[in-house]
Amino acid sequence: MQIVDIDFCVPEDLKSLVAIEEACFNDPWSELLIEYDLNNPGNAIYMKAIMKRTIVGYGVLGLLDETSHLMNLAVMPEFRRHGAALQLMAAFGELSRSNGCKRMRLEVRSSNITARRFYASMGFVYSSRLKSYYSDGEDALLLVSRLPIKIK
Ligand SMILES: CC(C)(COP(=O)(O)OP(=O)(O)OC[C@H]1O[C@@H](n2cnc3c(N)ncnc32)[C@H](O)[C@@H]1OP(=O)(O)O)[C@@H](O)C(=O)NCCC(=O)NCCS
């Protein structure tokens, strides 16, 4: 078991987050978008996972009325299966609860079996299918969980 620290992102993390995006997604978020968000906190909450002083993953959460929205989550391939994503989800779950949210929701590619297993392990369940949600035409599955989410 490796130690994972979780903290809020700062503008200086930009390059690390862009590297994670590019390593993890075929359609990564642009540097411009991430830079904007990091410099305009409030819009979306960015948190990072750190192992051995390296940013190995990050996630983005939006706080809506009673439902928080997980907008992004990614961990560098070589640092997976060490609990980094789980720790990010624990932090987002607490943040959601302390802001009065009762549920968390997220979209996941229907073909992304790894992520679907990951979210299922925390109690997320299928809510609906969003047709052609992604720019390449793939459907998204909308998943939801009551808070607190299950962190083993
Ligand atoms: C999904 C993702 C964020 C998981 O990150 P991670 O740090 O490896 O996840 P964790 O180590 O916290 O895993 C927690 C649990 O989730 C489940 N899980 C995670 N990866 C899994 C896999 N490849 N297969 C089956 N179960 C998996 C397991 O139950 C795991 O616990 P265990 O390792 O004790 O068995 C990571 O695989 C990733 O970045 N994927 C690419 C980007 C992506 O798809 N993001 C989600 C977009 S919606």
Image: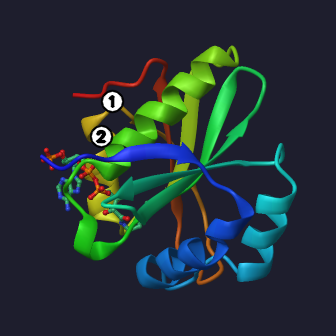
Relative to residue 99, is residue 70 drawn left or right?
A: left
Q: Amino acid at mark 1?
A: Gly
Front-most of residues 131 and 65:
65
Q: Secondary structure at mark 1?
A: loop
Relative to residue 152, is residue 48 drawn left or right?
A: right
Above or below, comparing residue 143 to residue 84 in the picture: above
Residue beneath disc 2: 120
Residue beneath disc 1: 123
Cβ at disc 2 under 8 Å from ligand 1:
no
The quadrant of the image that shows the C terminus is top left
Residue in the image at 78% along x and 71% along y: 35
Residue in the image at 83% along x and 43% along y: 42
**Splitting the image into four quadrants, where does ligand 1 fall?**
bottom left
The image's colour scheme reads rainbow
Residue in the image at 65% along x and 19% along y: 101
Q: Residues within 10 Å of mark 2 (few under 14, many from 20)?
A: some
Above or below, comparing residue 107 to residue 32 in the picture: above
Residue in the image at 56% along x and 38% along y: 105
Q: Secondary structure at mark 2?
A: helix
Relative to residue 135, is residue 65 drawn left or right?
A: right
Q: Residues within 10 Å of mark 1 (few under 14, many from 20)?
A: some
The Cα atoms of the two marked residues, 1 and 2, are separated by 5 Å
x then y, percent, for residue 145: 46, 28
Q: Amino acid at mark 2?
A: Ala
Task: Check if mark 1's residue and mark 2's residue have beta carbons within 8 Å.
Answer: yes
x then y, percent, for residue 80: 25, 63
Residue 44 in view, yes or no: yes
